[in-house]
Image: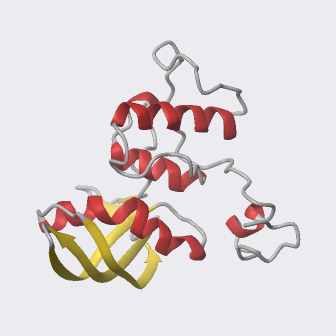
Amino acid sequence: MLEVTCSGAYRNNGNLEDFTDLKLLMPDCPEEWVKSNAINRCFVMAAEKEFKKRVDSVHSLYVDKVEKAKPKKDKSGKEIELLPSCCGKKIKSLNWEELQDLAMMFCLRAIPLYKSCDLRSARVIAYREYVNKIAGGELGDDYNFAAAADFDVPEVAIKTVAINGNADKVLTGNDVIGDDDTHTA
């Protein structure tokens, strides 16, 4: 997990609200994707929780620091590994935060952004994306979500979606987005 410290400004009821030192927790991802994931998948939920105000839009977001998140400690002082919020949860009942973590963890970009549609529709898309691109299944757009088998999201991203040619190298840190000759935007 990564802890991203950011600053910037957002709009709340037409007013521009500045913020600093907001900490976002997100699944590991390539460095090039940190800012995009921070803005699109993490910021609004974390800001609304932290500032107790509605976020109408992000005016600016600056990534000030990125570091590995420190493990938490239980009551006995033993370290507990931090995992994405979706891990160990039933895929068909993930909430918005868990859906965003699922999208980042497995590079499933088709999973809708926070509150860009209703939660049920987001779950339907997330299930189809996971089964088709990670589990190796084949579901069409018209599959029956209610009748589909439910399962737990694994704790480790054993497989991620191959995106635009060099994604495997990017995810392992051996390349950057767009360095492969076969890469298409």
Q: How is the image coloured?
A: secondary structure
Find the residue positioned furthest to the front: 14
Question: Is residue 60 something that shows in the picture?
Answer: yes
Q: Position of residue 69 (x, y in %)?
A: 41, 70
Between 4 and 42, the one lying in front of the other is 42
- How far across and down, in percent of the image, does residue 9 sit? 25, 80
Query: Quick check: 63 above or below 28?
Result: below
Q: Residue at x 37, y 62 (%)?
A: 42
Compared to residue 15, the image places residue 129 above or below, namely above
Name of the residue lying farthest toward the right: 181
- 25 left or right of 151 in image: left
* Residue 138, above or below 47: above
Name the outermost residue toward the bottom. 64
Residue nearest the observer in this picture, 70 or 119: 119
Vertical position of residue 181 compared to residue 164: above or below: below
Residue lying at 61% horizontally and 49% vertically, measured from the top left: 157
Q: Examine the rendering and report whether any part of residue 77 can be seen.
A: no
Left or right, 175 with reference to 31: right
The x and y percentages for residue 14 are: 15, 71
Q: Which image quadrant is residue 185 in?
A: bottom right
Q: For the image shown, how many numbered marks are present on the structure? A: 0
Name the residue located 73 percent from the left edge and 33 percent from the top edge. 136
In the image: residue 167, left or right of residue 150: right
Q: Nearer the viewer, residue 31 or 78?
A: 31
Q: Residue at x 59, y 76 (%)?
A: 32
Q: Quadrant of residue 21?
A: bottom left
